[in-house]
Each structure stands twice: as C-alpha cells, then as structure tokens.
Image (cartoon, rainbow, N blue to C red):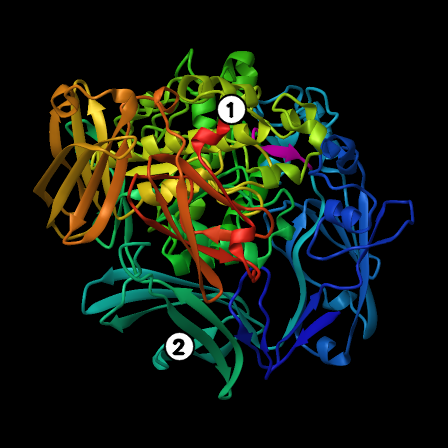
Amino acid sequence: MIKKFTIGLFFISFIMGCESINKEKMIIIEINNGWRVSALGKNEWLKAKVPGCIHTDLLSNKKIEDPFFRTNEKKLQWIDKVTWEYKTSFSISNDVLTRQNVRLNFKGLDTYADVYLNNKLVLKADNMFREWKVDCKKYLIVGKNTIIIIFHSPTQIGLEKLVKLGFQPPAANDLSEIGGMGKNKVSIFSRKAPYQFGWDWGPRLVTSGIWRPIYLEAWDSAKIENVFFQVKSVNKSLSVISASIEILSSSDQKLELTLTDVNNEKKLIKQEFSLKKGENISSFNFNIDNPKLWWTNGLGEPYLYKFTSALFQNNKVIDRQTTNFGIRTVKLIQKPDSAGKSFYVELNGVPVFMKGANYIPNDIFPTRVTARKYWRIISSAAKANINMLRVWGGGIYENDIFYDLCDQKGILAWQEFMFACSMYPVDSNSIQNIRQEFIDNVKRLRNHPCIALWCGNNEIDAGWAEGNEHGGWGWKQRCNAAQHQILWDSYKKIFYKTLPEVLGNLDSARFYWPSSPIAGFSDYGKSSLTSGDFHYWGVWHGKEPFEKFAERIGRFVSEYGFQSFPEFKTVKSYTIPEDYSIESEVMASHQRSGTGNMLIKKYMGNYYKSPKDFESFLYVSQVQQAEAIKSAIEAHRSRMPYCMGSLYWQLNDCWPVASWSSIDYFGRWKALHYFAKKAFNKFLISPRIEKDKIVIYAVSDSLDPFNAQLKLKLTDLKGKVLNSIQSTVAIKSNSSTKIYETETKSLLQDADPCNIFLFAELKINDRTLSDNIFYFVHPKDLVLPKPMIKTKVEKAGNCFHLILESNELAKNVYLSTIKGEGFFSDNYFDLIPGKKVIITFSPIRPIDNLNKILVIKTLTDTF
C-alpha cells in the first residue's frame, strides 16, 4: 500500500511521532508496502515489512526460530555476515513530477545502504542514526518506479575498518565471541545501535534494514523544514519565546508566515518574509500572556502549548507544521558548597530531586515496539512517581512518541548521545558523519520540554580515565603511546569539540555534560562523591553489602542497581521444564552479567533463607532486588539537598532475561517497581539505624511546609503492640527532615529483634502521607509465622477489589493469577497483623471470577 497525502487530508501519524500536518499542493507518499528481501545474489525473495529489519522479516517468514527462545540466539549469528537486498516498486502520477521539488526522505537506514532508484545509485548511507534526503526528480518516471536498497554486512565492514586501523580499541560489552568474531570487537566502527552487538543484559543480534519510514515528498514554492522554539524569559504574567523557522524556498520570493496558538486559536504572528532560493531561517520573538508552565510529574501539570506555523502564498496555505511546546526553564546548578559542588536540576526556579531510572530500548529489534508498548512503559514510570529517565547512550535516539509521552507525563529526559563503554576512533570523514548525526537528532528533539540536558556518552570517561595512570578499566594500559594518542584525540574531538559546537549552534540554552559519570566538565578520569554525577556499583559488581548504599552517596547518583529474575510466567516464555535451574545452559544464556545468577544466590545467602525450589528462587530474587534498591532510594532522598538525584539501573528490558530491570520485557512489574513507587512517593518516611540510634527522616517534595502527625508502633510478628509513640512534627518544604531519633535499646527494651518490626506513619488528620516498616534483622533471621490471610474479592466494574487481612505478619505478599494478565495496584507488600489492605486488580481482558485464578504467596511459602 502506498499512502498519498494532499490538501484536505489531515494526515498521518509518522512512526516518528510527528504532529499531523495539513498540506496544500504538497504531496507525501509513504513507501511502505510491497517490499521483498533476499540475500544478495540468491534471488530467494521473501515478504518484508517496512519499517522493520532482516531478523523480524526472517522470523515472520518462518526462516528462523524465535531468537529469544532457549539458546536460539547463538544459531542466528550468520545473519549479520550476509549482504541483504530489499526492493519494491511504487507508482506516481504526472502530478508528482510537475512539482518543482521532489525528494526521497529516508528517516532511518540500518546501516550501510546503497540505494538505487530506477537502477540509478542515488545514495550511499552509513549511519543508522541519520536522516537521508535525496533530490530525485530527475530519476523518476510517470507510472511504476523501483527502489532497491542493498544493506552490506555491518560486521564485515567493521572488520575491514579494524584491520585498517591496525589495533583493537576498547569495546567493553561487544559480545564478539558469541557472534563468531573471536576477539574482533567491531561495534565501535559503525554508527549503529551499540546494544545490538551485545551487552551485560542483552543479546547479540546485529540488524540490517529499513528501520524508519521512507517518504517521497513533492512541493512547489516552499516548505517548512524545521521549527525551533525557545523560552527567552518567563514570569507569572508574560513569557517571551523565540522562534526559528527553517524554510526551503524554490526561488527568491516573498511569503507570509503566521504562527497560531492552537489551544485558544489566537494568532501570535502574521508577518511577510523575503526568502532567497535555498535554505532560509526566519527568526522572531512572540509573547504568551499569563503563561501556563510545564511541570514534572508530581509537582504540577505538564502543560503543553500547540503552535502551528503556516506559510501562505497568495493567501493560500502552502505548508504548515504543528509543534507541541512546554514553557519552562531547566537549569543544572553546580555551586561550590562546604561539601564540594552541588549538582541538581532547577525547574522553573525550583530545585527538584530527580526520582527515576535508566532507560534502554524496549526491544533488541526497535521496530517491534508498538505505540501501546511505549505508552505502557512511560505510564508505568509515571505511576511509580518517576520524574526523570536517563536515555542511556548505548541504545538509540528514541522515536518521537517516547519524548511525546514524556512531555505529556511530566518526565524529564537525561538525553545521551549514542556512545557507550567504548573508545571510538575517528578520521575526517567519520567525524563529519557524526557531526551530521548530532545535527539531525538535536534538531528533531530540541522542542521537547522533557529534554533536561544533553550528555555526550555513557561511562567512556570512567573507563579510560585520562590523567589517572592507574585509573579506569584497564583500557589505556593496553595501548601503546601512538594508540593512546589516536583514541584520546578522537574522544576529545567528538565530545569536547564537535558536539559542543553543534549544541552551541542549535540548542545553546540547554546544559551539556560530556560524560556520565564525571566529577566536572573537564575533570578527566575523575568520579566523585562530592561533585558531578556518580555511578555506584560496589553493590553487585563489587559484591558489597546492601548497607553500603547508605554510605556511598554522591551529589547525583545517576546509576546503581541490583539484579533479579523475571517472574515464572516470563521465564516460561524462553525455557522448557528441563531448563528450570539457575545453573542450566538456557538460564545462563539469559544472564549476561558474567556469573550473575550465582551472584544473586550468593547475596541471597546473606539476607534470605534458601528457597525450596526454582519458582520460589525467582520470587525471592525479586524481593531481594526490591529491598536493595528501596534502601538505596531512601538513603539518597534522606540526604537532600546534598544528594539531588537517584536514577536506578534499569527501568526496562529488551528481551526476557535476568537483569537489573524493574519492569520485564513483557511489561510486567517486578517487585522493584512496586517498591520504587512507594520510595519515590511525594512524601516519604524513612526509618534507619545510625550507629546506636533509631533515626527517622521525613522527605517532602511539596513546595510548602506543614505540620503532620508521626505515629510509631513497635509490634511483634503476631500483632502485639510493644511500644507506641505519637507526636506532631514540622515538615520542611522540598527537603529531608530528621523528625525523630532515640537510642535503639530504649525503643526495643527487652524485645527480641528477630520477632519485631517498627511501623512508622506520617499522617495529616486521618490521611496517611507515607508509611514504612523497619526490621531490626535481615529477613533470614526473622521468626516468621505462617500467616492465615483472609481474602474477600468484590467486583467493581471491569476491575476487582481484594480486601486482605492477616492475624500475623504476612511478609512480601505476592498476588498473581494462574492464567490471564492484569495489574495489581500493589504487590510484594508486607501485610501487618489486623490491618486491612485493599488492592485493585485490573485485568487486561475481562474475567468473570478472580477467586478461581488468584494465587497468594508469602515469603514463608518459599522455604
């Protein structure tokens, strides 16, 4: 099917998420159907989906098995060694060829592509992350036209570049041996999604194909190429906004430009411009009276304006473009203080603690990610009170729908450029290619209010550690002097010259940070607890205890984490019963962090009793992960304003796997996501032991101070209250406040630490702002009873209410269903004796009787 759009058709939703545009006289044809693919020279043509990739095409044609099932990934490494040919035909009328301008717009080609239009070579592409625009009128004919795209093997081209360079640069996560490449790590030589070459949470499946749409565009007089809005100033009564509109003009001419606020149909600008043939930039300022500000999740409405820019010729619209825009100011504040230097986000003049996670692509094959899946993952982040996602530098520059949803949900994006954990050698040609990649993506993304800052790369500075002879990950120590110079010069050229130049020209108001983590802009090889952002991996990679999270706190902790397995339903999707052991080949294949499965088990021995079976092990691993990250989040938030950011690794998965994620590949919330929701709540009460004292912190994101009631109950596991305390406490605005402390011995008296817990509540009148449960020993040392949980299920429209009550402590109550899918409003929670809890279950598809499929498990059921 070929889609043709002309005046009167309010058209499209690009896969890129662009606004709908009403065109007059301009013709846009999406070339998305009739595609076929074959290995070059084989003439064995298969149906192909565009956008798509070779792996998904082979899968849909049943030429390969599911790459995610068992160890099938290893059988598919031949695919990236082959050159693939895609072809289709499309018909155009004379109406297209009468236009002054006709071009092909390739939104994304992966990666080394030779494009032939009617057997004429019109493009040689070599960057997955760029858009390619080709004037093609002279190659077209009325009627049937053909496009052939030959995708050369990215690994073979990478190997050629490696041989030419003469030495192996560092590429820490390139799983070359799985890929049959031996020790030849070639990912660094292609401007292509790094994670597809393998990572310590992802498979190695190196794709080729047409991964974003192709459009044929035809127009006459002029067209709008790009629109950029920027807040110049803002107060309660007025915001001044600058507009920069890039226009392609077919001749020297005068055209009228209007700008309209779509929300209230107010005309903001009506102005005549003199245009020269070729590229033009028209710049002007306009005012918004009584502006509505864009706020992050939890602080206010993320209000979005809609501005329509329209070009008129002889009082007729010849092109228009609508852009969503949020009025806000975002600054990254670094000020010297008694502890070092601050590092925090200031939104609309307010310091905001960043509560969030690191985000990776939702699938190893990004074209499989539907709009619904994007909505589900971003909505899940918002429900967990997240206000920032770090778009990690080893994935892709996401489709616009991702940023549109972040705009709508009030979630800021720490946006990295696609370089991670590797050194990238460049020459004059490749640096120009990278420069254009930067230009394309900065122009595409800069209008999104969610973009908080640009970051050059992930962990390259930390891995190399220039200036620190014994620092880093051993990279530079394996280089001779000449190799060292090549790689370090390339690094500086990319991240300290080219990228700052592009940002200075295209988006100078946004903050730029060269690498994550780093202590300061030019503090090469330095990571610090007292300045800059900080990655902490002592827990997990360093095998340190969870308690270290409370000690190793930086000014902005942008990465830390702990692993778990997905739930049994997910594990079943890639295994058979003989694989149900964490030491099986299949379970090891779906664990990319070295001996990660055994490390989970080792930690479990420190904190939990040994699970009785495989399914119980999966469940306990999730509870363990959740408790670990909960302790980290609470420690970070309690140290406001010293620490002003906590972004755990990671939000999501790109395949079903054991990983650090809080949401698995199928969108199922792990225990961690439920715990993060509570730990990131607007109000947090956090008990802990500091030396010999019980200390309680109250954290508030509210911009107003208030008084609240603190209620503490020391209770045994059967529900007997041993001690209770109640007082009125003053809660400061936007801060952490120590609201209570006492000697531990004084609170416990003669109580057995293995048989008690402290229940803490922060309340206003009868409304609970936050509650928390503190245990004085590790879960393995608790004398847990076998609880009797009373359950009542009530139908409520399409949902169900579960009323749960227990006579004794029910630790980590896990609710699931034998069949069907749905969402529980809370899960893996501790049910306190005598306290009723109401949980809502929302099924994806209607069910008649929840009682018949409901399963309830607690920690005591696992040993």
The label nearer to you, 1 versus 2, is 1
Q: Nearer the viewer, residue 737 or 792?
A: 792
Query: Which image quadrant is residue 607 in?
Result: top left
Q: Residue at x 56, y 46 (%)?
A: 362
Residue identifier under label 2: 262
Of the image marks 1 and 2, the number of the one nearer the N terminus: 2
Q: For mark 1, give the secondary structure.
A: loop
In the rendered image, which quarter contains the N terminus?
A: bottom right
Q: Nearer the viewer, residue 815 or 419?
A: 815
778 falls in the magenta region: no
Relative to 621, does residue 141 appear above or below in the rendering?
below
Residue 103 spot, x, y in % from top left: 67, 65
Residue 397 spot, x, y in % from top left: 53, 47
Q: Amino acid at mark 2?
A: Val
Relative to 520, does residue 781 appear above or below in the rendering?
above
Residue 570 spot, x, y in % from top left: 60, 40
Q: Residue at x 44, y 74 (%)?
A: 309
| The disc label shown at residue 611, or none | 1
* For residue 471, side relative to residue 300 (left or right): right
Relative to 540, does residue 201 appear above or below in the rendering?
below
The residue stretch that appears in magenta: 200-205
* For residue 311, side relative to residue 334 (left or right): right
Q: Nearer the viewer, residue 553 or 546?
A: 546
Q: Amino acid at mark 1?
A: Pro
* For residue 204, side relative to residue 508 (left or right): right
Relative to 657, does residue 92 appear above or below in the rendering?
below
